[in-house]
Structure formats: structure tokens, C-alpha cells
Amino acid sequence: MALWDRLKESASTMQTQLIAKKNDLKSGAFRDSSMAMCALVAAADGTVDPSERRRVAQLIATNEVLQNFPADDLRRRFEDNLDKLTADVDFGKVSVMQEIAKAKRKPAEARAVVQIGIVIGGADGDFDKDEQAVVREACYALDLPPHEFDL
């Protein structure tokens, strides 16, 4: 199976798993961690152009699992995290990783945050090495083994 096909299958499987857990993913820690993850993946290559920002914001707004939360609140949190990453990459990344780490107290939420990162990263059909690397770093912040997600 080609890498592209495996990627699409993996992202689809993870989205299905997330939907199955939707009712368990309602905490503020999950909300904050998942928005930080989305921002981290969007800024993985060091830049965030306006079209990428809109695309990820649209994915957040339409993701069934994230519909547990008000869309405006999610967008604001996503934008705040992106602003931190673009204002100062190093300090921004520390702050965003701290947000992501909020989910580590609940393993199901921590796994869901990583899965959201993979779904967002693969949504454009190219879960590139920069995106994989930041999701792998997030795994460490969440005390999860990256190999569990084929990273």
C-alpha cells in the first residue's frame, strides 16, 4: 500500500475513533489541548499563510468531535495559540506545549489530542515530516509513545 493510501486510511480511522469517544471529550483540558495541537500542526513548517489558517479553522469548525464546544471559542483559542507561535517561535512553542500537556491527566483525552493532530495534519493529503515531528513532540508532552500512532 502506498504511503499516501496508508495516511488517508490512518486519518480516517482516527477520525472514526474520535467520533466514537465524542461524549467523553468534553473537558476544558481537552478543548485547550486540542486547539493548541491544531495551532502547532498548522505552524509546523515555521509559517502560517492565511489560506492555511482558514483551512485549519474550517476543519476545526466542522470536526464532529469538536462540536462539543462553541465554534467561536475554539477559533479564538486556535488563533491565540497561532499568535503565540508566530510572535516568538521558541517561547510560543513552550507555551503551546504546556497547553497540550493539560490533557495528559486523562489518557483517553491525551490520545484524542494526538489523533486530532494527525487528522488535521493529514487533512490536506500530506502529513509531512514537519507535522509528524511536532505531533511526535506532543506525544512526549502527553507521556504517550509516538510509535502507538505510527510516528
Image (spheres, rainbow, N blue to C red):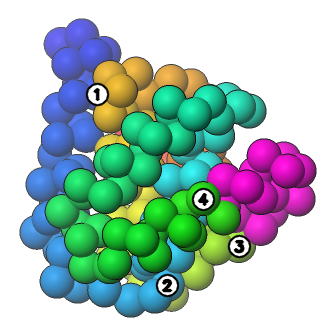
The part of the chain drawn in magenta is 81-96
Q: Is residue 7 left or right of residue 41?
A: left
Q: Which residue is mark 4?
A: 79
Amino acid type at image mark 4? Glu
Q: Which residue is mark 3?
A: 98
Q: Which residue is mark 1?
A: 7
Checking the image for residue 113, the label placed there is: none
- Badge 3 crowding class, 10 Å Cα cut-off, few under 14, some 14 to 19, many 20 or more, is some
Residue sitting at x 56%, y 69%: 77
Marks 4 and 1, Cα distance to the nearest angstrom? 27 Å
Residue 5 pos. (x, y %): 20, 19
- State yes or no: discs 1 and 3 in contact (Cβ < 8 Å): no
Marks 2 and 4, Cα distance to the nearest angstrom? 17 Å
User: Measured along the vertical axis of the image, is residue 106 above or below residue 62?
Assistant: below
Residue 41, quarter of the rendered image? top right
Amino acid type at image mark 3? Gln
Residue 37 pos. (x, y %): 53, 57
Q: Which residue is mark 2?
A: 29
Amino acid type at image mark 1? Leu
Question: What secondary structure do most residues of the magenta stretch adopt?
Answer: helix
Amino acid type at image mark 2? Ala
- Sequence-wise first label, 1 or 3: 1
Residue 18 pos. (x, y %): 21, 63
Residue 95 is a magenta residue:
yes
Residue 106 pos. (x, y %): 42, 85
